[in-house]
């Protein structure tokens, strides 16, 4: 045997030993070995196996619309140029796309058309699909939440969606970013969406399908115009769809190729010629058919969550409601489908049985708008716009199911014809008579606590502790504290929150921790650092995370529990919001949520603090809530964290905090602290200013306290008397139905009020006074009748007189003749 062959055998044997000894990351991503690691924490711990990045890949971009077509590049891994036609990318274990190697030996994949949002696992094969050795994750995003620059823009979208209605026609135009399609020549294609089968049965199916091309082999110059023609059946049966721009090198309608898509929209411009001949009549027929369908479908309204009473409540209840991207006052939204509204929110979670959604809209005064008063009112949805796990089947398909059952029908009944009464019969607004706001607890400053029941205290232990635990709801929120360090590097006898980790049921573990005083907050999912550079909203397993800016993070769980984290002057303010389902079901440093602050300081062994005014007693209570390593949700990905928190007592017994700040009359900061810290909460502000030797720190504490108290005020119970109908043959003035609101009644001409002219919403949730009616005005009737009778009498007398005179003339004429 030659030397060359011996060398090859030796390399193969060495490679086999290397692999079988568990030292390769091929097929082992997420695992840890004795000598190296393929776990995501290996980078920060500097113990990664040599081939970690080769097999556990990172990509850029890491996200794109669930319509697919995004070309993403594999980072840090090299590919052989000979693999140009041998790369296969597999998503979710069964959806395959063909990748390629570029001139710099970098591998690329094309994201596929998906029916779901969130992190999608993928594998890469470099042997034409025989083995898949490289692993990663791709973030599939609801098209409405993706950046507009990544989509085909329908110029004057109203023209597209009203095309064929009176006075709407002409050429349609669209534009796109040419860099999103790697081709010189492109096709413009129409794709349609439809749901078939019996709703809520096993036969219910969803489908995106290529319909036809608008044009082929066009220059990729970023713009295209055309005059649409009515589609023939069966194409005209598809009333919802998107336009796709893709390379002309692929046959028309090829799935899962590099492309850029428009948003899904109502295909008015493509509908049958009958629509253009009389769009209102066509739409009414569709509206009536939808009305009959809704009567056969199960009622989902009873299980949807009620809307908050006010805009302030809606914006404060961040665990259950989130801004509707189509009507956002922060972004100057025009609220196309809700005229008169300035802001709408959606229920974050779909309803439990029917996966329905809830939308709540508010006017400039903060009053909820109801559909009984305005076409722009709040509406429930049979299909939640953002979908619902597991996403793939109706009515849980993100965006599309909502369009089919809730938006197209709005076009039929309200926008393409004037028959909204049918729509609002099945989509009436939820008022807020049974809405119950969540309770709020907060940790802020160095650190201070205000429990769900409003008890305030300070606990400066160093370690890892249970902030909130609910066994019945399977929620756990844990906090890590570390010493406060002065600007000169000196540690003081006070601590601050440096990390919060949380999970509910079998959800992913989300951890939010200080990245640095000026760098923002770092978010981890199951110990893996997440990036918000491309998307501010992330769908994770059993939890949603929203981070619009690096200093703000909101975590939302299916139970309606929400955790807000805000970075202020190097401290992390943490607010936990819990709905009433958690009543009498919480333990930990934020107390027992039961509207009784006297039993909030209960230690983990069940002992109640006998005197809450003694700091040592409170400190003893706090340290009892130190967690165990076995139950820890935290990430230990540095030597400091390993030595300080994992391999050390969870509560540091050697750290003795100062229970009160030193107040030296000669301290110049003392008078400044007195000036800054006044009113309610001044004790917290004063302590933090003097301990941290920082007015900015004290001010951050003051801001956090005031923000919490403002939120508590916003979330107070608001009494609603519910919608008040105007009387028949009359009208009302006023559409606010909360305690103290006054609604005035008036009648049409020829009718008068029978009952009170105004009603006031009372504290018991009832309107004052009896029901108001508009009845016929009897006096007017008498007057009118008298006038008519008088005129009739005059006419009769006049007739008699004229008749008598005529007779006399006739008699006189006869007599003259005879004479």
Image (cartoon, helix red, strand yellow):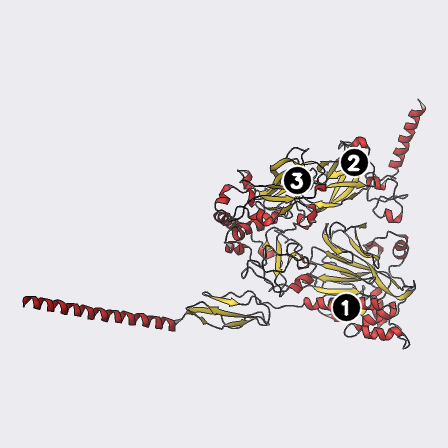
Query: Callout 2: 10 Å neighbours few (<14), some, many (20+)?
Result: some
Count numbered badges in the picture.
3
In which image quadrant can residue 223 be found? top right
Q: Is residue 372 left or right of residue 105?
A: left
Secondary structure at badge 3 equals: strand
Rounded to the nearest whole Å, what is the CA distance between mark 3 and mark 1? Answer: 52 Å
Q: Given this view, does label 3 or label 1 mark the residue nearer the observer?
A: 3
Find residue 748 and report its horizontal and vertical position in percent. 45, 67
Secondary structure at badge 2 equals: loop
Q: Is residue 727 left or right of residue 223?
A: left
Find residue 389 and report its horizontal and vertical position in percent. 67, 48
**In front: 196, or 288?**
288
Secondary structure at badge 1 equals: helix
Q: Residue at x 50, y 51 (%)?
A: 417
Residue 608 visible to the viewer: no
* Quadrant occupied by the C terminus: bottom left
Find residue 602 and report its horizontal and vertical position in percent. 79, 67
Query: Which residue is labeled 1 in the image?
Result: 705
Q: Is residue 456 left or right of residue 331?
A: right
Mark sitting on residue 109: none
Q: Earlier in the sequence, mark 3 or mark 1?
A: 3
Mark sitting on residue 245: 3
Rounded to the nearest whole Å, what is the CA distance between mark 3 and mark 2? Answer: 22 Å
Query: Callout 1: 10 Å neighbours few (<14), some, many (20+)?
Result: many
Q: Given this view, does label 2 or label 1 mark the residue nearer the observer?
A: 2
Query: Which residue is labeled 2 in the image?
Result: 102
Is residue 246 depicted above or below 689 in this figure?
Answer: above
Q: Earlier in the sequence, mark 2 or mark 1?
A: 2
* Quadrant occupied by the N terminus: top right
Query: Callout 3: 10 Å neighbours few (<14), some, many (20+)?
Result: many
**In front: 342, or 163?**
163
Q: Earlier in the sequence, mark 3 or mark 2?
A: 2
């Amino acid at each position: 045997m030659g030397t060359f062959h011996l060398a090859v055998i030796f390399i193969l044997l060495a490679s086999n030993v290397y692999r079988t000894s568990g030292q390769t990351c091929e097929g082992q991503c997420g695992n840890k070995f004795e000598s190296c690691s393929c776990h995501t924490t290996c980078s920060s711990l500097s113990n990664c196996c040599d081939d970690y990045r080769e097999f556990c890949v990172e990509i850029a971009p890491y996200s794109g619309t669930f319509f697919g077509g995004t070309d993403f590049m594999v980072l840090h891994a090299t590919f052989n140029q000979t693999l140009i036609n041998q790369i296969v990318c597999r998503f979710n274990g069964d959806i395959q796309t063909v990748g390629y190697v570029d001139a710099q030996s970098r591998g690329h994949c094309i994201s596929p058309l998906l029916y779901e949002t969130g992190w999608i696992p993928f594998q890469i094969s470099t042997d034409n699909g025989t083995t898949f050795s490289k692993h990663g994750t791709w973030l599939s995003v609801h098209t409405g939440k993706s950046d507009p620059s990544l989509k085909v823009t329908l110029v004057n979208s109203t023209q597209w969606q009203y095309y064929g209605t009176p006075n709407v026609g002409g050429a349609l135009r669209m534009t796109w970013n040419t860099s999103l399609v790697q081709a010189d020549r492109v096709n413009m294609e129409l794709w349609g969406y439809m749901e078939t089968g019996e709703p809520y049965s096993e036969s219910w199916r969803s489908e995106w399908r290529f319909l036809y091309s608008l044009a082929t082999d066009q220059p990729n110059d970023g713009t295209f115009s055309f005059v649409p023609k009515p589609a023939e059946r069966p194409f005209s049966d598809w009333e919802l769809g998107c336009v796709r721009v893709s390379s002309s090198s692929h046959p028309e309608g090829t799935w899962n190729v590099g492309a850029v898509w428009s948003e899904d929209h109502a295909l008015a411009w493509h509908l049958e010629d009958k629509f253009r001949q009389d769009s209102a009549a066509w739409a009414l027929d569709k509206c009536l058919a939808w009305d009959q369908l809704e009567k056969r479908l199960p009622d989902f309204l009873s299980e949807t969550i009620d809307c908050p009473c006010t805009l302030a409540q809606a914006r404060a209840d961040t665990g259950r409601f989130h801004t509707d991207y189509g009507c956002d006052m922060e972004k100057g939204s025009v609220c196309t489908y809700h005229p008169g509204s300035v802001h709408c929110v959606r229920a974050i979670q779909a309803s439990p049985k029917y996966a329905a959604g809830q939308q709540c809209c508010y006017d400039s005064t903060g009053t909820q708008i109801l559909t009984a008063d305005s076409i722009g009112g709040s509406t429930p949805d049979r299909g939640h716009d953002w979908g619902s796990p597991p996403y793939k089947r109706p009515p849980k398909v993100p965006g599309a199911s909502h369009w089919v059952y809730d938006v197209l029908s709005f076009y039929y009944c309200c926008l393409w014809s004037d028959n909204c009464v049918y729509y609002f019969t099945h989509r009436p607004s939820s008022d807020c008579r049974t809405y119950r706001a969540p309770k709020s607890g907060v940790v802020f400053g160095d650190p201070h606590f205000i429990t769900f029941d409003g008890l305030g205290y300070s606990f400066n232990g160093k370690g890892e502790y249970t902030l909130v635990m609910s066994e019945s709801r399977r929620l756990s929120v844990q906090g890590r504290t570390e010493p406060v360090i002065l600007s000169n590097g000196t540690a003081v006898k006070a601590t601050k929150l440096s990390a919060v980790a949380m999970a509910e049921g079998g959800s992913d573990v989300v951890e939010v921790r200080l990245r640095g005083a000026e760098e923002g907050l770092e978010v981890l999912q199951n110990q893996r650092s997440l990036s918000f550079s491309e998307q501010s909203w992330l769908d994770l397993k059993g939890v949603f995370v929203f981070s619009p800016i690096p200093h703000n993070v909101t975590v939302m769980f299916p139970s309606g529990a929400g955790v807000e984290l805000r970075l202020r002057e190097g401290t992390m303010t943490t607010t936990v919001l819990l709905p009433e389902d958690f009543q009498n079901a919480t333990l930990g440093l934020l107390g027992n949520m039961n509207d009784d602050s006297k039993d909030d300081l209960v230690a983990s062994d069940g002992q109640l603090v006998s005197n809450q005014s003694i700091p040592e007693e409170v400190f003893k209570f706090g340290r009892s809530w130190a967690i165990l390593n076995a139950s820890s949700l935290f990430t230990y990905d540095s030597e400091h964290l390993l030595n300080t928190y994992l391999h050390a007592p969870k509560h540091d017994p050697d750290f003795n905090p100062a229970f009160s700040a030193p107040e030296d009359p000669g301290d110049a900061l003392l008078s400044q602290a007195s000036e800054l810290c006044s009113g309610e909460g001044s004790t917290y502000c004063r302590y933090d200013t003097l301990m941290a030797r920082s007015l900015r720190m004290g001010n951050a504490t003051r801001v956090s306290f005031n923000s919490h108290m403002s939120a508590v005020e916003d979330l107070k119970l608001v009494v609603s008397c519910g919608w008040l109908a105007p009387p028949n043959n009359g009208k009302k003035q006023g559409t606010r139905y909360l305690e103290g609101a006054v609604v005035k009644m008036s009648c049409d001409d020829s009718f008068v009020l029978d009952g009170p002219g105004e009603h006031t919403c009372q504290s018991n949730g009832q309107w004052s006074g009896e029901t108001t009616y508009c009845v016929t005005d009897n006096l007017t009737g008498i007057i009118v009748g008298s006038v008519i009778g008088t005129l009739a009498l005059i006419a009769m007398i006049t007739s008699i007189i004229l008749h008598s005179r005529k007779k006399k003339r006739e008699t006189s004429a006869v007599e003259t003749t005879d004479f």
